[in-house]
Image (cartoon, helix red, strand yellow):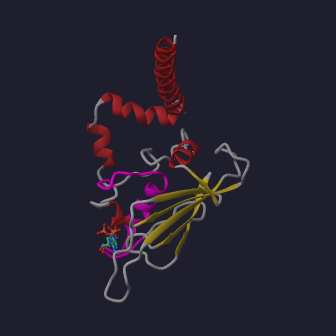
Amino acid sequence: MHLKRIELRGFKSFPEKTEIVFNKGITAVVGPNGSGKSNISDAVRWVLGEQSMKSLRGDKVEDVIFAGSDKKKAMNYCEAALTIDNSDGEIDLEFTEITVKRRAYRSGESEFFINGKQCRMKDIKELFLDTGVGKDSYSIIEQGKIDDILNTTGSSRRKVFDEACGISKYRYRKLEAEKNLKNTSENLERINDIYFELE
Ligand code: ATP
């Protein structure tokens, strides 16, 4: 599995449709300070479901949308798409190429797509569980991340190893199952209350 392509439109400093192609092997993105190199990795984490504006180096949700320049008006929406080569089948979908896309509007609304089909953010997060590609995973090492990993608590550091060993999926599913169990027992309690009221 490898990231083949990133397409941006209206994302941060990229108002025009911009396509960045990654061939197999190493790709280096070079450019002067402030030219938008880090905005590219922000786009990757944003598509994968990043919600913390601090971690996307902004304050408000709309800070990911092109804010305008001397030459170009601000935009009302932005989108970013990642195309992944899945010919090794690492992602559990029958497609050999998978495109995940996120679109956001100034109103704060976000839309997510997998191969053009609208989905939930949760679906995108689940797709990448245990692949090392999720928004918090070790495939994106931004400035300061190594220090964070070294200085963090044991339980947070363990999450990195869980992802690498392929067990974070089970941890995630356990939490989901516990949430469903809690909801179900609350519903049962409610039904019992109604039942006794009717009796
Ligand atoms: P450095 O080498 O200094 O780390 P960089 O190439 O990584 O820089 P970025 O941090 O990716 O640069 O980009 C910063 C630029 O992006 C700034 O010029 C900033 O004005 C611009 N920028 C960020 N958000 C927006 C936005 N919403 N609209 C327009 N421009 C934006």
* Residue placed furthest toward the bottom: 71
Question: Is residue 163 depicted above or below 89 in this figure?
Answer: above
Residue 33 position in % (x across, y down)? 30, 73
The residue lying at 37 percent from left, 84 percent from top is: 73
> Is residue 10 shown left or right of residue 93?
left
- Residue drawn at the location 39% of the way across and 30% of the way down: 158
Magenta stretch encompasses residue 93: no
Q: Nearer the viewer, residue 152 or 55?
A: 55
Q: Nearer the viewer, residue 132 or 168?
A: 168
Q: Can you give x and y, in whole percent of width and height, for residue 125 in the image?
A: 52, 45
* Relative vertical location of residue 48 with respect to residue 151 in this rendering, above or below: below
The mark total stands at 0
Q: Residue 127 location in percent, x, y?
A: 58, 44
Q: Is residue 44 above or below residue 177?
A: below
What percent of the width, then of the height, locates residue 61? 34, 60
Q: Using residue 84 as the reference point, say whether residue 88 is left or right of it.
A: right
Residue 150 location, quadrant: top left
Relative horizontal placement of residue 6, taking residue 156 as reference (left or right): right
Ligand 1 quadrant assignment: bottom left
Q: Residue furthest right?
A: 94
Q: Is residue 54 magenta?
A: yes
Q: In the image, which residues are magenta?
A: 30-55
User: Relative to 19, does residue 82 appear above or below in the rendering?
Assistant: above
